[in-house]
Amino acid sequence: MTRIAGVFVLVVSLYAWLYFSNPDNFGANVVVDLLNRHGFYGLLTLGVGVLIITGGIDLSIGSVVALGAVSFGVLMRSGVPPVLAAMLVGLGGALIGLLHGILCTYGQLQSFLVTLCGLFVYRGLARTISGIGEHTAEQTVSLYSIKAEQPSAASALDALRAGIVGKQANGALDFPMEFVLMLGFAAILAVVLHGSAAGRYWYAVGSNRQAARYSGVNADRHQIIAFIISSTCAALGGVILLLDFASVDPASAGAEFELLAITGAVIGGCSLRGGEGTIVGIVLGAAILPAINKLNIFLGIPNTVIPIVVGLTLLAGASLDEILRRRG
Amino acid sequence: MLMSLAPVLEATAITKQFPGVRALDGVSLQVHAGEVVAVVGENGAGKSTLMKVLAGVYQPDSGALHRNGVPIHFDTPLAAMRAGISLIHQELNLAENLSVADNLFLGREPTWGGPLRFVDRATIRHRGTELLQRVGLDTTLLPHIVGRLPPGQKQLVEIARALGLDAKVLIMDEPTSSLTQRETDRLYTVIDNLKAAGVSVVYISHRLAEVTRVAGRAVVLRDGRLAGELAQAELTHENLVRLMVGRDLHQFFPREHRQSHGPERLTVSGLRWVGSKAAPATFAVRAGEVFGMAGLIGAGRTELAEAIFGVRAIATGEVRVDGQPIRVREPRDAIHAGVLLVPEDRRLHGLVIDNSVGFNLSLPNLHMLSRTLLRLIVPQRERAFHQRMIARLRIRTPTASQRAGLLSGGNQQKIVFARWLARGPAVLILDEPTRGVDVGAKAEIYQLIDELAGQGVAILMISSDMEELLGMSDRVIVLHEGRVAGELSRDQLSEVAVMRLATGGASE
């Protein structure tokens, strides 16, 4: 509880600082944009947060985001209807998670290692398949070129974009759909994690896998489910990324997103030792990064400084947590 | 002989207190040059504590140590080693991924090049060869990685390392616990050679056959005190057992439900777990029976329980519950069949220690506390369940949301019992049910065991606590080195009979 209060204070003060640094700039468009950024990071952070609670880690998120975005584009380019393409990408993400989960349970490999390998493999896959059917090795995937190749899918694509991102065909953002969808997802996860037997098992597996097993919990199965959630969130994140930014570079899309998601989850109260964390905390933790990013625009802090700020914020948060833990 | 000289090492009236127990109470021991003294006692008699005091691991609360008649004090194991006293641990202290040669000289490598301290390979080879010859090891092993050697050779490497430190007294704590018979025989030869070279050995073992073979004298400890000393002529199995036991059963064991027992509920036939070197185990526990399983540490009792519960893979054999064969691959299969385990290591296997009392009570019982739809937990039902179990077992905790790790050992153990009670066990396996439990909670746990037996539960109780075993059991089987050494009915049951079987003696 103190942990959630702590993150809450941090989030409120960051946004207050953001507002007071330049009240005139803080229009409705900025608010909607901030909320959508939060929605996007929130999705990835929730996915990895649940996994961290069960004692796992996922370093492949950024590459799965890129692979998801590229395959979403490539599928549509080759004539798959947008909604079906998005669903197929989600399914692909689930399969990636299943693979990770099996390797980490029955294969007895460490999740850090398995997903580190995934980080390279999925990035390479994203870059390789981006040129399929175009006679080039690698190319940027964009909504513009998809519409050019599949004119009949243009309207369905625009509808999907409006429904998931909240952007119109001309690119104007009028409603923070990503944020709303993320909140809906968070609500479902909160019910499962805090209200169902499965959620209890996730905490037990993360906190003491052996004791969970001795209590009759199918630890392997619950661990695998958490991997599936993380990778599915990442793959769908790729879909959202392409819809939102209209163009995706396979070599750089989603880079370091796994680290940003893990940072959000840890600031939000997940312990990398497993067994700790709440959905509210994770959602709040994911709000930090968009605010720091906006601060750089509002305060004129150079882009190059942002990683320093993020790193030091995480270090400060983790140290504070450790101090509180030792006292309590 | 030289026996008239001052002992190489002498401990006088050593007392060592740990929170809640007096591990050593005025124990004295003399070690003369070139002799092998055995230190014998039951589990928890104080053997290991005494050895650790001699080797500088622990500092005694009172008492004195003399080396060749000169008072001496060891602050650290290193100080003891410098004085020529080396402890060969039960768990060997070798760097597994380094070579034999590197291990022999670890931390004191001969060097050249002055301050540059290059390792002097030639000297290591030369002196290493010499050390391996002294313990009868093949000198070509020098460059081999220690982790790949069999346990017997590792043991000898450790002894060679101690000799390299010019040890005059070697303390060996259960040196043969992981050795084969051939490796053990080889160790005896090495010990005989060391003795001839004037090195003294303090030999701790609970295998009495070994003691009579290797030692020239034996000191017996019981409950932290010196129970007696046997010279070579008196060194027999019978005499050792007589000194090791011989206590009154002063504790109260409430076995009211010692009625005639029902049909077999747990039937174990020809059971061996994967990796077991032991003979298959066969036994049966009846409804309402408290079936004790005795044996010394390392006899394979916990492993057997783990195999029945599905933690350890079964190689051969069959487990039946109420006559029905059960296939157990994971603990959840056993739990489903009504076979429940209260594990030996409460903090590691019994509880999610960082979570709350309530979390732990609920964990294996969530199916009763949640709706069928989506398995959503019903908070009122859960709260009521917590209150009921806390009251029923008198778990002393401020609230159900208290962290389990903050409770006393006894109350933690009550949580482990409580969560199984709710499931209505058919078979309850208890592995050291009162280890680390205070006296008050102990009595409550005994009462609970009796009550469950009265309800027809078959109880398999592994215990190293002799009083508990004799006080609670209706029947006892004794394991010795992985095989069933014998079975004792209620009228045959005595401490002497159990110890005789547990230490490898024949049944009468």
Image (cartoon, grey):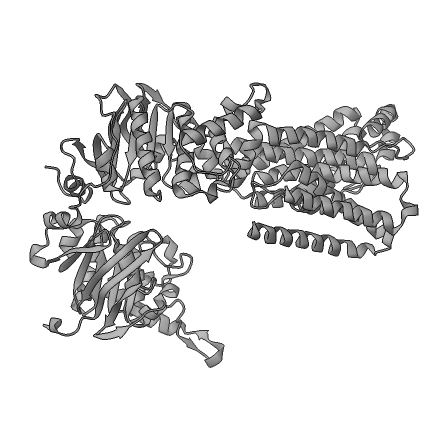
What is the tally of numbered marks visible in this picture? 0
Q: Quadrant of residue B161?
A: bottom left
Q: Who's the residue at 56% across and 46% down the image? A: A273
Position of residue B120 relative to residue B16, above or below, is below
Q: Where's residue B243, x and y in %?
A: 14, 50
Residue drawn at x 55%, y 36% is: A203
Quadrant for the N terminus of chain B, please.
bottom left
Q: Residue furthest left?
A: B233
Rendering coords of residue A126 (x, y %): 72, 39
Position of B51 compared to B100: left or right? left
Image quadrant where residue B111 sits: bottom left
Q: Residue at x 90, y 47 (%)?
A: A23
Q: Quadrant of residue B441?
A: top left
Where does residue B55 sit, x and y in percent of width and height? Answer: 30, 64
What residue is shown at x 50% (from left), y 22% (from top)? Answer: B368
Q: Position of residue A270 (x, y in %)?
A: 62, 43
Q: Is residue B104 visible?
A: yes
B310 or B75, which lies in front?
B75
